[in-house]
Amino acid sequence: MIAAARRGSGVVTRIEEFARRFLVAFSSGGDRLDEVGDRNVDIFDRSLKRKHRDRAAWLKGTRDPLLDLVTENLLDRLDDCTHKFPVALNLGGAVDHVKRSIRGRGGIERLITMDMSKDMIKKTLESSSLDGYDKFNKNIESLHVIGDEEFLPFKSGWQSLYFVYVNYPSLQGPIHRSLDLIISCLGLHWVNDLPGAMTQCRMALKPDGLFLASMYGGDTLRELRIACTAAQLEREGGVSPRISPLAQVRDAGNLLTRAGLALPTVDVDEYTVNYPSAFELIEHLRCMGDTNAVLQRNQIMRRDTALAAAAIYESMFGGTDGTVPATFQIIFMAGWSPHESQQKPKRRGSATASFTDIQKAFGGVDESGRPEH
């Protein structure tokens, strides 16, 4: 659902008519919605996730060591690029951390921050004025849009759609395909149609535009997953999903390729955070807006089951200092919108030198082609 926000009034109105017009405009164009990805089954409750992010906006502080570290490692990749990205989209997840950490990277001149939560957008606006963002990014024009990652309003041909920017109430108009860079830091793991969302990102980019994202990998919170499963089996005799299903590292490259992005790059890092107990871990997840939003979840967790899970967590994974570790596996992805200037693989069979010749040149084999000892 797309929402329009007006700064000052504090009122955000969901406009159902805009959503219907969005679907009509999309399906009547060259790229049909049902051809973008697999939207046969919804896994996550997006309405609940919006409420989680509304709550998280006011629970968390301006600093979070985990989010700060992941954001910094993601944006470091911009320092390795010689390209300039005048127009960038900050898409969901740790939007305030990305906005605060840009600090002139990538030659960004206009930064559009988009999130499904009106409270998260409001908090981002407020925190920007408090933590010195304007001092370090005074040359960057900041725009704020409330919208859903599953239905990006950034594609040419959607002239019938209009959005109101939060901090520019008088600025209205269609948003065309004009993005040079899309940054998504820990926001895509709650999207139902991940291939479709990434395809929309590619369609929103200019040729030779960069898609840069990070998301949780399948080994994230493996300790909590084990503890909750064991506790539910012991106390309730069955298991309901308590941890969101997450993408595996081996799938990330396929997602980039399927979305039509060129020169895909994937790498992974693991971070271990120690908490006093499992309850502080749950509170941290709540502050990040990352609590359970699986549609098939059991909406109530019994008190005795929660206490048993915490006890199992501590007994299985607790350290000698009395803390419990939590693993966060982060997948970093990068892909480029196709352009004729990009390097391309040679035609199969067009090689002019064999590996044997290369090995001989570097002293790897003898005259007979056998490895040298």
Image: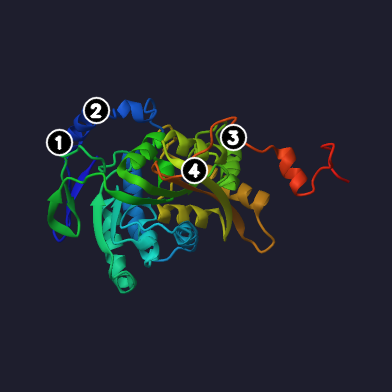
Closer to viewer: mark 2 or mark 1: 2
Mark nearer the N terminus (4 vs 3): 3
The tag on residue 27 is: 2
Closer to viewer: mark 4 or mark 1: 4
Disc 1 marks which residue? Answer: 17
Q: Give the spatial CA distance, label 3 vs label 1.
A: 46 Å
Mark nearer the N terminus (2 vs 4): 2
Please name the residue shown 58% across and 53% down the image. Answer: 270
Mark nearer the N terminus (3 vs 1): 1
Please name the residue shown 60% across and 44% down the image. Answer: 227
Closer to viewer: mark 4 or mark 3: 4
Tell me which amino acid carries mark 4. Pro
Please indicate whether residue 77 sits to the left or right of residue 84 in the image. Answer: right
Tell me which amino acid carries mark 1. Glu
Q: Give the spatial CA distance, label 2 vs label 4.
A: 28 Å
Q: Where does residue 173 sit, x and y in percent of width and height?
A: 14, 48
Q: Secondary structure at mark 3?
A: helix
Asked if disc 4 and disc 1 are in contact, CB closer than 8 Å, the reply is no
